[in-house]
Amino acid sequence: MPKKPGTNPKGEFAFFNVIYEDDSQRSNRRVPSELLGGLDGDEPARAFIAEQDREIAEKSGRPVLEIKTISRVGAKKK
């Protein structure tokens, strides 16, 4: 049964664009908000996404791509 619109909690996830060493890009990668903030800022997102990539690579049989940069979706460029 489908959910009613607007019933998903807002702010549960932060979204990131990821650029890999081969210059490929994956957009809107979800990271739980409770991992972010504090003194480390968005740095825990890199470790979370890298772990997701390792799991995906294991299942698909493809090599793991190294992350070049991550940026939060909607954040202003420095």
Image (cartoon, rainbow, N blue to C red):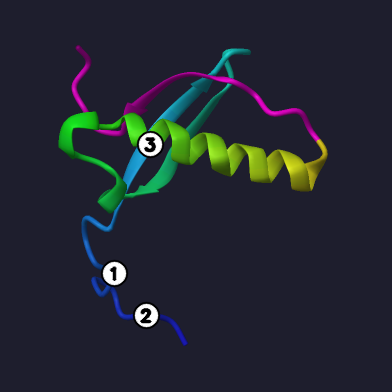
- Dominant SS type (magenta): loop
Residue 22 among magenta residues:
no
Is 70 positioned to the left or the right of 4 in the image? right
Q: Is label 1 in contact with label 2 (beta carbons under 8 Å)?
A: yes
Mark 1 or mark 2: name the one nearer the start of the chain: 2
Q: Is residue 5 above or below residue 33?
A: below
Residue that sits furthest to the right in the current view: 61
Residue 69 among magenta residues:
yes
The crowd level at tag 2 (other Cα within 10 Å; few <14, some 14-19, many 20+) is few
Query: Tag 1: residue type?
Result: Asn
Query: Tag 2: residue type?
Result: Lys
Q: Is label 2 in contact with label 3 (beta carbons under 8 Å)?
A: no
Mark 2 element type: loop
Query: Tag 3: residue type?
Result: Ala
Which numbered circle lies on residue 74?
A: none
Q: Which residue is mark 1?
A: 8
Per the rendered image, the range of residues in magenta is: 62-78
Is 3 positioned to the left or the right of 21 in the image? left
The crowd level at tag 1 (other Cα within 10 Å; few <14, some 14-19, many 20+) is few
Q: Which residue is mark 3?
A: 45
Q: Which residue is mark 2?
A: 3
The crowd level at tag 3 (other Cα within 10 Å; few <14, some 14-19, many 20+) is many
Which of the 4 image quadrants contains residue 53?
top right
Mark 1 or mark 3, which is nearer to you?
Answer: 3
Residue 51: x and y in percent read 56, 40
**Image point 65% across, 24% down: which residue?**
65
Q: Is residue 37 above or below residue 78?
A: below
Residue 18: x and y in percent read 46, 27
Residue 12: x and y in percent read 27, 58
Distance between mark 1 and mark 3 Cα atoms: 21 Å
Mark 2 or mark 3, which is nearer to you?
Answer: 3
